[in-house]
Image (cartoon, grey):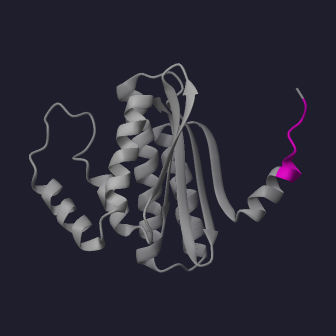
């Protein structure tokens, strides 16, 4: 096995304005540690507290969604996440991806496409409706508010992609701009 081209990787990070990148199995403690590093970075950049909180919240939501999906699906490799935070032209982009079952990924892409067609008022109404909806006692995850909240905070529609990788598996990626 040859050594990785770290300089080439660094150049790519510089070109794409990547501030943070992680690729590997994600755990609760790792989410927390990376989150602390992100918080410290955002604080050092003197980003407004509201914007820093939105970037941090998007990171937490994306990584916890991956962790919850991996636990509930029992899909091998679903806990291996790629997470990137980048900064360009005054905006922060938080993106994350992992392996999913094709049907699960398609449903998620459709849901996110629906959010992309909504304006801020419609997203707020949807959020409030979901908030009032009784929570399923058997649900493994939350009330389903996280994606709606990210869509509300995003400065442009969230971008979701699904890449089929065979054997009823796909790689799902979601990106939010703040």
- The residue that appears at 55% across and 63% down in the rendered structure is 93
Q: Position of residue 82 (x, y in %)?
A: 59, 43
- The residue that appears at 21% across and 47% down in the rendered structure is 143
Q: Position of residue 74 (x, y in %)?
A: 41, 22
- The residue that appears at 38% across and 30% down in the rendered structure is 103
Image quadrant where residue 106 sits: top left
Question: Is residue 141 depicted above or below 178 in this figure?
Answer: above
Q: Position of residue 62 (x, y in %)?
A: 44, 49
Q: Does 127 appear in magenta? A: no
Image quadrant where residue 132 sits: bottom left
Towards the viewer: 120 or 52 = 120
Picture mark count: 0
Say left or right for 18 vs 158.
Answer: right
What's the magenta region? Answer: 2-8
**In the image, farthest residue toward the top:** 167
Question: Is residue 169 depicted above or below 113 in this figure?
Answer: above
**In the image, farthest residue toward the front:** 117
Q: Position of residue 94 (x, y in %)?
A: 53, 59
Question: Is residue 67 depicted above or below 146 in this figure?
Answer: above
Towards the viewer: 3 or 176 = 176
Q: Does 5 appear in magenta? A: yes
- The residue that appears at 71% across and 62% down in the rendered structure is 16
- Quadrant occupied by the N terminus: top right
């Amino acid at each position: 096995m040859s050594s990785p081209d770290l300089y080439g990787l660094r150049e790519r990070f510089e070109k794409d304005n990547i501030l943070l990148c992680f690729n590997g199995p994600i755990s609760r403690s790792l989410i927390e540690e990376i989150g602390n590093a992100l918080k410290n970075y955002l604080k050092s950049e003197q980003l407004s507290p509201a914007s820093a909180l939105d970037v941090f919240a998007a990171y937490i939501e994306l990584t916890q969604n991956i962790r919850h999906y991996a636990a509930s699906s029992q899909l091998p490799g679903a806990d291996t996440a790629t997470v990137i935070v980048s900064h360009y032209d005054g905006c922060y982009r938080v993106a994350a991806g992992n392996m999913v079952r094709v049907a699960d990924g398609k449903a998620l892409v459709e849901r996110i496409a629906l959010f992309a067609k909504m304006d801020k008022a419609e997203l707020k109404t949807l959020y409030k409706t979901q908030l009032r909806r009784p929570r399923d006692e058997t649900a493994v995850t939350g009330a389903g508010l996280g994606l709606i909240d990210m869509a509300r905070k995003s400065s442009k529609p969230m971008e979701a992609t699904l890449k089929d990788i065979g054997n009823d598996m796909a790689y799902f990626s979601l990106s939010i701009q703040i």
